Image (tube, helix red, strand yellow):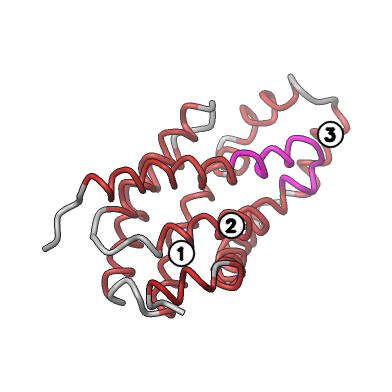
Amino acid sequence: MKKLTTRDLINIGIFTVLYFAAVAVFGQLGALVPILQVLGPLYIPIIAGIPFMLFLTRVDTFGMVTILGILVGLLVLATGQAFWVPLLALVLAPAADLIFRAGGYRRWTTTVAGYVVFSLMLIGTVVPLFFAREAFLARIGQRHDAAWVQSMVDLTPNWMFVVMIGMLAVGAVIGAYLGRALLRKHFERAGIA
């Protein structure tokens, strides 16, 4: 089995920053308008798919995706989010890594499937909204008025959690295709296109 090189670790570091920046910046849109918070699971993996797909053109060693996922989870935790993202990253990032490896890091169907599995860790950002609702609403109530908080309640009945998981999967598929389209030259060079 191929070992991680210094170059691999540098790529992991660079793309951890790029992927996390895409997730964090576009995730903050949800703090502006309640509907954007609800739609975040759809549009965040679309945007984050661009740096992630570029990262995959450099991946040929098991462990690279796992490390990136765990680092992103820790960064999400460091920004004050609940521990769910890093916890999910411990399971989903290695699972995605295994899927990418099963496709030899080059088969498109496993690339898309791996990115969907990887993206599912982002559901951890909304777990408190559904499973620790009172504490979550009290926390956002410190930053927003009562009408904003009520909008969040109205937009997120319990069944919406399952819809958000579906939105993450759909967003990840779109993000994979968008990333490949925008980065076609890199994909052709890496033999993935």
Q: Residue at x 31, y 77 (%)?
A: 103
Residue 112 in percent (x, y) is at 47, 72
Nearer-the-camera pick, 188 or 62: 188
- Residue ID for mark 2: 45
Q: Secondary structure at mark 2?
A: helix
Residue 42 in percent (x, y) is at 66, 59
Location of residue 63 by image quarter: bottom left
- Rounded to the nearest angstrom, the CA distance separating label 2 from label 1 is 9 Å
Q: Residue at x 73, y 41 (%)?
A: 30
User: Which is in the foreground here, disc 2 or disc 3?
Assistant: 2
Q: Secondary structure at mark 1?
A: helix
The segment highlighted magenta reads 24-37
Q: Which mark is residue 115?
A: 1
Determine whether label 3 and label 1 are within 8 Å by CB: no
Pick whichever of labels 2 and 3 is earlier in the sequence: 2
Nearer-the-camera pick, 187 or 78: 187
Amino acid type shown at disc 1: Tyr
Residue 35 in percent (x, y) is at 80, 48
Location of residue 144 by image quarter: top right
Determine whether label 2 and label 1 are within 8 Å by CB: yes
Q: Residue at x 80, y 46 (%)?
A: 154
**Magenta stretch: dominant secondary structure:** helix
Q: Which mark is residue 192?
A: none
Q: Quadrant of the N terminus?
A: bottom left
User: Which is in the foreground here, disc 3 or disc 1?
Assistant: 1
Amino acid type shown at disc 2: Pro
Amino acid type shown at disc 3: Trp
Residue 35: say if magenta. yes
